[in-house]
């Protein structure tokens, strides 16, 4: 399996001085460049929030994380249990390893668990992708990200919009560092290391810019029978109109379809198991349109120059709205997709000329340098 290209070498920090904690695929993707940059200084903890091999292990391999130092087992537990047990076990790891710094990313249960553990242990905490706000209190992720931002010592904001959100909440400007989002370099490095895409398209019988790539996994869509069935019926309608629909099916989504007796809705689609990051990006790079409820895909599409219909009521990534992304309801999805497909050639040409609003591809470098300085300062003070 191909690996993401390595980051440039820097001055070494003490071994295991930076604990990097993640639990889901998006965290693996965005923190992998940082893990590689830190080298032996990184002590990697995986909470197991995504515990299926296809949802986790293959991402670790394809993104070049050669070793997880501590594997937890919180996957499958209710949210409160994931956070509580995760925080307890991460605090135990901190006590044993004694890192000078803990770094987390995003807004998952793993993120808040590690943040609470670091805070309770008195270890400096850095939050990658700080300042995202959907202003939607129905989202568990919104609560997670707000809490983590307010207890983190270093807030690595991707954009000026994120920085403004933090300042509006009274967070000291000295704690905020606008770095860009590591997703830009993650996508670029993975695409640079990838082999020819033609084989992947041929395997599925696809032509470039002549198919739709879809994903679906969020609670508001998958756990709501009305929304799930409306979305799957829209996928079916798109496929019946002559546009192949490629659907790597999330385990949560497949389980709910089975419970509803609605697996037949997958019959008209190219429904497969979840992809490696390499394969997903290969297909996303040549799709006419992406349809997703994922936050990460909203970012990745800006690097790939692809339009995304976001099946959500709100987004914490407004920087891409109106250019790369548009919010849609499950009920309007079929008609909105048809309208976008009718002008897809001109849309792709327009997006190809736009830079990603999420940074210049040097976010990891900026974050790593700040962490190195912080760790060095901490070591000097304790010496």
Image: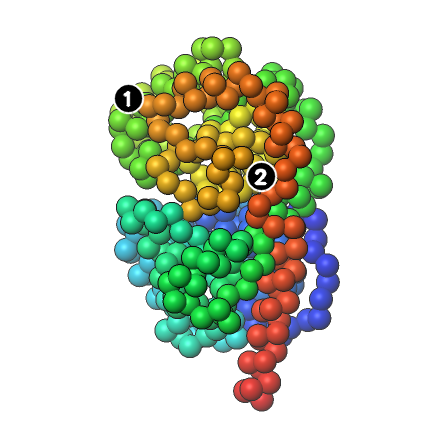
Mark 2 surroundings: few (<14), some (14-19) or many (≥20) residues within 10 A: many
Q: Residue 351's mark?
A: none
Q: Which residue is mark 2?
A: 302
Closest to the observer: 326 or 190?
326
Q: Residue at x 62, y 71 (%)?
A: 372
Q: CA distance from mark 2 to mark 1?
A: 36 Å
Quadrant of the image occupied by residue 177: bottom right
Q: Is residue 199 left or right of residue 81?
A: right
Q: Is residue 143 above or below residue 91?
A: above
Residue at 41 percent across and 14 percent down: it is 237
Residue 356 shown left or right of residue 78 in the figure: right
- What colour scheme has been applied to the protein in the rendered image? rainbow
- Residue at 28% in and 46% down: 138
Say what secondary structure mark 1 lies in: loop
* Up-down relation of residue 93 to residue 253 (above or below): below
Q: Position of residue 295 (x, y in %)?
A: 46, 42
The residue that label 1 is drawn on is 261
- Total marks placed: 2
Give the crowd class for mark 1: few <14, some 14-19, many >=20 residues within 10 Å. Answer: few
Give the percent coordinates (x, y) of residue 379: 58, 82
Q: Earlier in the sequence, mark 2 or mark 1?
A: 1
Q: Nearer the viewer, residue 38 or 179?
A: 179
Residue at image location 53% in from the left, 35% down from the top: 323
Q: Is residue 56 left or right of residue 360?
A: left
Q: Please identify the quadrant where the N terminus is shown.
A: top right
């Amino acid at each position: 399996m191909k690996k993401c290209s390595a980051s440039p070498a820097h001055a070494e920090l003490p071994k295991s001085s930076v604990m990097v904690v993640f639990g889901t695929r998006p965290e693996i993707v965005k923190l992998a460049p940082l893990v590689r940059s830190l080298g032996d200084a990184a002590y990697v903890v995986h909470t197991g929030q995504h515990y299926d091999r296809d949802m986790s292990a293959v991402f670790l391999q394809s993104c070049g994380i050669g070793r997880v130092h501590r594997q937890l087992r919180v996957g499958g537990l209710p949210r409160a249990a994931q956070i509580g047990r995760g925080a307890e076990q991460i605090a135990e790891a901190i006590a044993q390893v004694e890192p000078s710094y803990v770094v987390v990313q995003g807004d998952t249960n793993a993120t808040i668990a590690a943040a609470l553990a670091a805070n309770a242990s008195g270890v400096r905490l850095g939050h990658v992708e700080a300042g995202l706000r959907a202003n939607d209190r129905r989202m568990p992720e919104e609560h997670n990200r707000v809490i983590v931002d307010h207890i983190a010592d270093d807030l690595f904001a991707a954009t000026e919009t994120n920085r403004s959100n933090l300042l509006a909440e009274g967070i000291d400007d000295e704690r905020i560092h606008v770095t860009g989002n590591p997703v830009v370099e993650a996508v670029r490095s993975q695409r640079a290391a990838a082999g020819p895409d033609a084989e992947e398209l041929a395997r599925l019988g696809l032509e470039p810019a002549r198919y739709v790539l879809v994903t679906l996994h969020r609670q508001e869509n998958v756990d709501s029978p009305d929304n799930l069935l409306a979305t799957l019926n829209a996928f079916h309608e798109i496929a019946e109109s002559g546009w192949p629909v490629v659907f790597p099916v999330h385990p949560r989504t497949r389980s709910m379809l089975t419970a509803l007796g609605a697996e037949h809705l997958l019959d008209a689609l190219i429904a497969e198991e979840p992809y490696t990051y390499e394969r997903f990006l290969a297909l996303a790079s040549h799709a006419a349109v992406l349809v997703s409820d994922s936050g990460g895909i909203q970012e990745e599409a800006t690097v790939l120059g692809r339009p995304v219909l976001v099946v959500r009521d709100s987004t914490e990534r407004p920087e891409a709205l109106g250019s790369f992304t548009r919010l849609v309801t499950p009920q309007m999805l079929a008609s909105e997709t048809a309208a976008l497909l009718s002008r897809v050639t001109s849309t792709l040409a327009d997006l190809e000329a736009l830079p990603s609003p999420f940074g210049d591809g040097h976010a990891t470098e900026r974050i790593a340098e700040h962490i190195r300085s912080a760790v060095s300062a901490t070591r000097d003070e304790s010496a």
